[in-house]
Amino acid sequence: MIPGPGNILVLPPESYLTERGVVRQNSTSLVHVADLHSPIMGTVQAFIKAFPDRFSGNGLVNEIIGYLIAQEAGFPIADEAYLIPLPSELLFQIHPEYIQDLSSEHGLVITWGTRAISGPPLRYVHSIDDPEIQKRLLKNWSDLPSLLALDDFLGNEDRTSDNLISINNGRFALVDHADIAGGISRDNDLLNPFSSIKNALLLDLFDGKVPHNIQSGMLKAAESHPLIFERAKPKIQYWLNTLLPNENKHTKTLLEYLQIRATTSYTRIKRQEGMLL
């Protein structure tokens, strides 16, 4: 099978081999680990995310957009991503408490998968769960300003230690983009590209006292956002049309939101929260 744009593959249900255990489950997303057969990589371990029916469209679209833009921005991400229609019955067995949320008239649920990245979530890097050590590691990461700027561009208010994977030499890979662009439960008619967001990671690390070098790095990264979006846009358009073939208004709204966020990124980051005035 040839991957679609951005190294995202649509896999048939029979590619799913073995469930390895539940990672997280709540009212907005259900995540477990499984073995998959990738036509490119062979048997791989992957994180499989299913969204309750009412959030499925936004959740899948957000994951795709975040993955593609992070890819164009040069951040470490999973080597492959997958869209996999899985039988509802299979997911019922893995997440029995959420049967009502996973109902599907077609008997299949389209899930999002990413090939597992070697390394633990940031909060598991140290056996002692010391948030100050975690903050020190992140503050020394050379790509931190670019990540903070990227989250502002994408409207991501949910960057936590659980969606940063420690890989090597003080570097981190990005996972989980479900809450970008107004969040998983957004009303697309109310998307406002000019709104400021609560950049959770920025607040957690610096508590409103952002060092000059971080501010400067964020602004430098913001200058590249229009080009990053232009490179990612055809891929995003392809997958939006694939997932939402009859929702042109929805697709247009999302693309306009991202376009404006990208082109106003520098001025928005400069002015918000009193930064670099």
Image: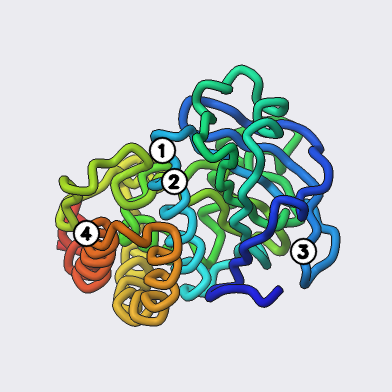
Disc 2 designates what residue? 59
Disc 1 designates what residue? 55
Residues at circles 4 and 1 in contact by the CB criterion of under 8 Å: no
Residue sitting at 61 percent across and 17 percent down? 97
How packed mark 1 is, by other alpha carbons closer than 10 Å (few <14, some 14-19, many 20 or more), is some
Residue sitting at 51 percent across and 54 percent down? 139
Residues at circles 1 and 2 in contact by the CB criterion of under 8 Å: yes
First of labels 4, 2 by sequence position? 2
Q: Secondary structure at mark 3?
A: strand
Picture colour scheme? rainbow
First of labels 4, 1 by sequence position? 1
Q: Secondary structure at mark 2?
A: helix
How packed mark 3 is, by other alpha carbons closer than 10 Å (few <14, some 14-19, many 20 or more), is some
Disc 4 designates what residue? 249
Residue type at tag 3: Ser
How packed mark 4 is, by other alpha carbons closer than 10 Å (few <14, some 14-19, many 20 or more), is few
Disc 3 designates what residue? 38
Q: CA distance from mark 1 to mark 2?
A: 6 Å
Residue type at tag 1: Phe
Q: Secondary structure at mark 1?
A: helix
Q: CA distance from mark 4 to mark 2?
A: 17 Å
